[in-house]
Amino acid sequence: MSTKKPNIVFLLSDDQGAWAMGCSGNEEIITPNLDKLAAEGMRFENFFCASPVCSPARASLLTGRIPSQHGVHDWIRDDNKKQEDIEYLAGQTAYTDILAQEGYVCGLSGKWHLGKSSVPQKSFTHWFAHKSGGGPYYGAPFYREGRLVYEPGYVTDVITDDAISFLKEHAGKQPFYLHVGYTAPHAPWLNNHPKEYTDLYENCRFLSCPMEKEHPDSIYLTKEVLQDLRANQIGYYAAATAMDYNIGRILEQLDKLGIREETLVIFGSDNGFSCGHHGFWGKGNGTFPINMYESSVKVPMIMSQPGVIEPGMVNSSLLSAYDFMPTLLDYVGIEGTDRGEKLPGKSFLPALLGQEFHQGESIVVMDEYGPNRMIRGTRYKFIKRYPYGPNELYDLQEDPGERRNLLLAGNEKDEEIGRTMNYELEQWFINYVNPEIDGAKEPVFGSGQIGLAGLWSKGEVSHSCDDYIKEKLKE
């Protein structure tokens, strides 16, 4: 690799399953620019979020910490006034802080969703931040230079326009990091997307996202979608294609500026998503109890830099969002990235550069969403729900669709596998959890976080519980 530090553009989508790209085998969704990016670089087919919901997943990408280390355990609600006063990652080191110390200028265009969106954080000097975590695609609220504005245009275009302005301003000067946080393809899907994109799917059969029999634990989103399933399918795919078009605009701008070969381009999503898979629409909180299905925890991840990363490669290593920070800093030649912190992630730079990078049966990835945790190896996945269950064990080799919970069969061999994986899970989390903000002790229902977690809350309520979930708890 060159000794010159590369520019970095991180394109992060919102609620996009790993299945929702042409390059991952979906023959119906139209994503030519993502497909081209994958053809020019490396696609990771077994990349997992650290938590299957947006805010904690994003916090883990930024800090290399699991939720029980950074304290964000659920999506952050913005429907109460005090949310604008909480900076959830205050005092925690993000990779952008380290990049800035090493001479990078850091810019944010789009979704932040980690509290106090009005104020630049984590060494970003350019700050065009969405006020909340999502919402309508027209008239979206943004903070520009500290002032709240409502952008009349289509939000995916608006975010891209700002990102391109940043590129034009900083190209050829000092190295830059640009974080492009799209809200696509997050809901809403009805009457929110340009006709030029929805028309593309008028004749689509949507065989790539079949609506299965409704999951018994599905929540209100699935029921809303089923009122007009086809229109929602069209909206989800249209939102993804509109984002793909705008990603093409950014890639084209890098070419025009003559800096594509100097720039590492990354595409990923915060968490996975089900569009009818397993009989529900949503992510980890698309059901209650919260789920850890593959469609919820597996996310897209593509990295490309011409002349550095070999084109057209697909890597099957088990990797996690907590591996992202050490890898990114390793890629740009910054050592000592842990800064004395006890972080779980490991750099996968050798894999990215096509060097020897072997993983055996003992390699696992971990996930957590409040009192719900997962350990996933190359064959088996174990999900633990504190304190009473129901726990789950899946053989992903024999049952890749996760249809048969082996713990219900009463087979001694399967129960032994479950006990072993439970022990490994407990040992791993004990090693990294901050007991002050331990997610296993948090009342996380998937309805949103409204304050600091655990002891950091100083006795205040941290998590919301919607009326719909309250009714589910009574069942």
Image (cartoon, helix red, strand yellow):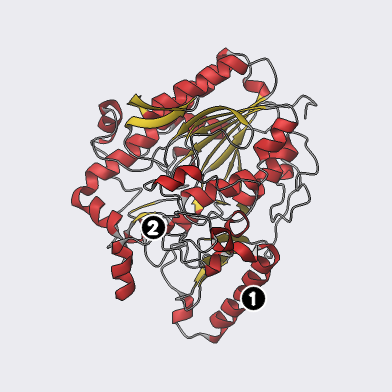
User: How packed is label 2: few (under 14 Cα within 10 Å), some, or many (20 or more)?
Assistant: some
The image quadrant of residue 66 is: bottom right
Residue at (71% x, 45% y) in the render = 326
The circle drawn on residue 447 is 2
- The N terminus is located in which quarter? top right
Residue 352 visible in image:
no
Front disc: 2 or 1: 2
Q: In the rendered view of the protein, which quadrant contains the C terminus?
A: bottom left
In the image: residue 463, left or right of residue 235: right
Residue 377: where, in percent of width, then height?
A: 61, 64
Whether residue 337 sits left or right of residue 409 in the image: it is right
Q: Residue at x 64, y 52 (%)?
A: 65
* Residue 460 place in picture, x, y as percent: 48, 61
Residue 119 in sight from this viewpoint: yes
Q: How many marks?
A: 2
- Mark positioned earlier in the residue sequence (2 or 1): 1
The kind of secondary structure element at disc 2 is loop
Q: Residue 49 shows which numbered tag?
A: none
Residue at 64% x, 62% y: name it.
364
Left or right of 55? Residue 206 is left
Q: What is the x, y in percent for residue 28?
A: 35, 40
Residue holding disc 1: 423
Which of 152/411 is in front?
152
